[in-house]
Image (cartoon, rainbow, N blue to C red):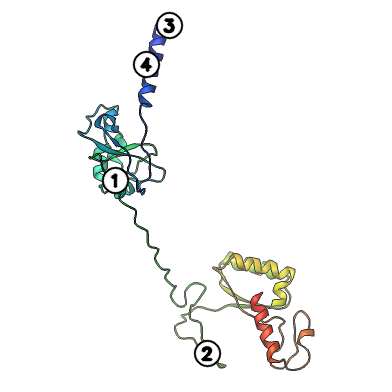
Amino acid sequence: MSHPTGRVVALFAAVLLLVAACGGPTPSGSAGSATASASRSASESPAGTAASGAPSPTGGVTTYTVQPGDTLSSIGRAWGVSVAQLQAWNGAAYPSLATDPGVLQAGWVLIVSGGSDATPRPSAPVATPAPTPPPAGSGCSAGNRMAAGSPQTFSTIPGAGKGVALTLDMGGRLDPGVDILRLLIREQVCVTLFPTGAMAQSEEGQGIMAIVRAHPELFEIGNHTMHHCDLVRGGGGSPTTAPCAGGPPSTSFITHELTDAGAI
């Protein structure tokens, strides 16, 4: 059994250590902030309080409290110093930092300048590079649309590559549609679907269109008109023939068949 006096001495020593650890405010900020951390005297710097007893830097210093997400490189860029210099200044207080600059913990107080009046550099905006279009024939889009105009027939498209354009019409039965799309997604097959507006508005069609919308990396949508009418002779139709009856369609009817489906 330990002597009561010994426990009192140990408790008193622990209180002194706790008071010493909480003795001063901790500077805060982020590496990219425009406000400098408070300057510290040598006796207040991390190196001056290191358990190793390493000597403190002479003169005033500027310190910075590490924030979540900081790296030694980002701190160095913000304060205009090298990683090696940060390691040299702070290796005594944080020995692991001297050998591994990747070991950095939020809350560490680092010396970031040998002077007391240093301020962080303003952070420069990061330019977002413009997306590079995929080369023709790669991925799910060839990227070389043919210009609209007079009727044309193509046996080949220059620069289209050796890809195959798989197209599926969606103007009749839809009961296997979900299973077909699941297969295409599982096999990562690129497809252009041509739904009619009438089918896209049906309950089954809306389920299929939701799957298409969720996978833009695989599926493209083409216009298959509103009711699948024969736009030259009239007739046809999906799901009924009523909108398409009455002989050759008018220009207004053809326009609505395309624009209404496009809107859906």
Comparing labels 3 and 4, the label whose residue is closer to the camera = 4
Question: Mark 4 or mark 2: which comes first in sequence?
Answer: 4
Q: Mark 3 sits on what residue?
A: 4
Q: Mark 4 sits on what residue?
A: 13
Question: Mark 3 or mark 1: which comes first in sequence?
Answer: 3
Q: Residue, x 36% and y 21% (percent of image)?
A: 17
Identify the residue at the far left of this view.
58
Question: Mark 4 or mark 1: which comes first in sequence?
Answer: 4
Comparing labels 2 and 3, the label whose residue is closer to the camera = 3
Residue 169: in sight, yes or no? no
Q: Residue, x 39% and y 8% (percent of image)?
A: 6
Please tell me whether mark 3 sits on a helix, a strand or a loop: helix
Please tell me whether mark 4 sits on a helix, a strand or a loop: helix
Q: CA distance from mark 3 to mark 1?
A: 52 Å
Label 4 packing within 10 angstroms: few (<14), some (14-19), many (20+) = few
Amino acid type, residue under disc 1 in the picture: Thr
